[in-house]
Image (tube, helix red, strand yellow):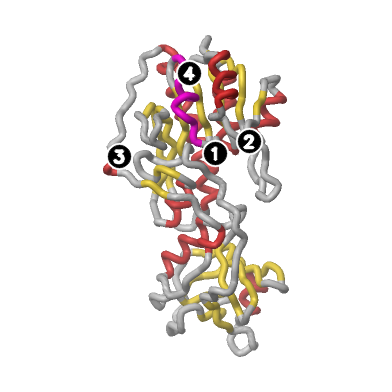
Amino acid sequence: MSSSAIVFAYHDVGCRCLSVLLANGVRVPLVVTHRDSPGENIWFASVERMAREAGLEVATPDDPNEPGFVARLEAIAPDFIFSFYYRRMLSPAVLATARRGAFNMHGSLLPKYRGRVPINWAVIHGERETGATLHEMVAKPDAGRIAGQEAVPIGDNDTASEVFARVTQAAGRVLERALPSLVAGTAELRPQALREGSYFRGRKAEDGRIDWSKGAREIHNLVRAVAPPYPGAFTALQGRRVRVLRTWWSDPPPIAPGAPGTVTAAGGRAWACCGDGRWLELREVEIEGAGSLEGAALAARFAPGAGGMGQFTFDRGATGAAADLPGTTTT
């Protein structure tokens, strides 16, 4: 392909989609990405490293919408701008520097889950599928016409990071399919029915606090939506902070319900009672001062009669870190 594209990219999706462009002969005169934040858990691939290894020019502006940087883009005058999990909104002035259009890869089946961290929100709400959507960029976030999309399943016990890995691969396939018609100028873009969709804000680690008065399904969805490498769901036990790192949706033991937050062991597994009276299996728990417990060690910690049975609490005094979950209004 003989077209040129300036690529705004970050994260695994950024690397996957940049590789698709290069493999299909798109000329990339500039890659725009972020400097990694020292306060963030960088568990994903580096767009900057990949681009430099490919011999591409890289820029990491604090504000890509600043007039001086826009002038730099105007001088390049690319055919296309692509945004792949870049975390800043791109202004109309930036978008206008692309002669043939600007397109973004978003991690949901638009118009559902427009906005920030769409995969995490989809898991929180118990969705059975999400996906990747390539869409035209306009002034309003995630609102432009759709160039292609692909659905991926979400299982009962999938974590957000596991779903993200599927979405990353789907994003590459969506871009691969859409590129020929975009370059040829024959792409049929489908308008979004925004009224049928939804828009969500970003999330803070504090939003991972578990309210044990909620039902088991809602708590399970929260745990798996923010499970590592995200900050994790948390609660308190006897004044100590506890991170609930993994729960499992399975048949509960034949024991009477306890108060919400009651923790015990049965059948060699640990369980917590939720607000609807259903027991939720605990697979991995990190207790402040005691480290991470899972499997038999976790069950032994909460075995009835062994002094281990306890009560998780919705302790408003227990605080979490304040870092954002990775995501952006333009992804």
| Residue denoted by label 3 | 194
Circle 1/circle 2 CB separation < 8 Å: yes
Q: Helix, strand or loop at disc 2?
A: loop
Q: Is residue 132 above or below residue 316?
A: above
Which one is in front, 133 or 89? Answer: 89
Circle 4/circle 2 CB separation < 8 Å: no
Labels 3 and 2: the sequence-earlier one: 2
Q: Give how far apart the Cα atoms at labels 4 and 1 are.
A: 19 Å
Circle 4/circle 3 CB separation < 8 Å: no
Residue 197: percent from left, percent from top: 32, 44
The residue segment tinted magenta is: 89-99
| Residue denoted by label 1 | 87
Q: Is residue 27 above or below residue 44?
A: above
Which one is in front, 187 or 269? Answer: 187
Q: Residues within 10 Å of mark 1 (few under 14, many from 20)?
A: many
| Numbered badge on residue 34 | 2
Circle 3/circle 2 CB separation < 8 Å: no
Labels 4 and 3: the sequence-earlier one: 4
Q: Helix, strand or loop at disc 1?
A: loop
Residue occupying the far top of the picture: 2
| Numbered badge on residue 33 | none
| Residue denoted by label 4 | 98
Quarter occupied by residue 206? bottom right
Q: Is residue 67 above or below residue 252?
A: above
Labels 1 and 3: the sequence-earlier one: 1
| Residue at screen point 41% across, 35% down | 150
| Residue at screen point 43% across, 20% down | 101
